[in-house]
Image (cartoon, grey):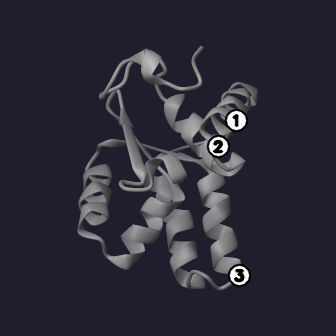
Amino acid sequence: MSALRPANFLRRAGVTALDTGFFLRLLEGHEGAKAKWQALVEGEEGLVSGLSLVELLRLGLKGALARQDAELLLKAIPAVCRVVWPDWGIGERAARLSHGLHLPLVDALILATALSANPLSCQHGSPSSDPADP
């Protein structure tokens, strides 16, 4: 996800939202990703857009990700994290984020899903720091 590339996760109001890149880093053995996954397994609340699952499935199908790794993630993610599929509200917010931040639409949908976890409070910054808000 372009806007979150360095960490591949966003933390808002006690919920950690993870994008596809996070899971790729996890498979690569990055220490930060492994530590964050362990925290999620131990009970920290995690949120993943259903579109990240679709992206991981696609990567597995085209051979960019080992098929068994993709299958493992597709089983583990819903067991550990809350999976949220975009609805109209998320889609509308994503369109504004995509336009305003020049993000690819799928990345904007994943970001809008993360921001929807608790739109009135965030760990860093203020609610008005959301570029989708007028």
Q: Mark 3 or mark 2, which is nearer the start of the sequence?
A: 3
The answer to which of 43 and 13 lies nearer the viewer is: 13
Mark 2 or 3: in front is 2
Mark 3 sits on what residue? 62
Give the x, y percent position of residue 20: 53, 60
The answer to which of 1 and 39 lies nearer the viewer is: 1
As helix, strand or loop, the secondary structure at mark 2 comes to loop
Is 110 placed above or below 112 here? below
As helix, strand or loop, the secondary structure at mark 3 comes to loop
As helix, strand or loop, the secondary structure at mark 1 comes to helix
| Residue at 30% over, 43% down | 44
Mark 1 sits on what residue? 99
**Quadrant in which the C terminus is drawn:** top right
Q: Mark 1 or mark 3, which is nearer the start of the sequence?
A: 3
Is 43 placed above or below 57 here? above
Give the x, y percent position of residue 67: 60, 83
Classify residue 34 as left or right of residue 76: left
Count up the numbered dots.
Answer: 3
Label annotation for residue 59: none
Give the x, y percent position of residue 66: 56, 85
The amino acid type of the residue labelled 1 equals His
The amino acid type of the residue labelled 2 equals His
Classify residue 114 as left or right of residue 87: left
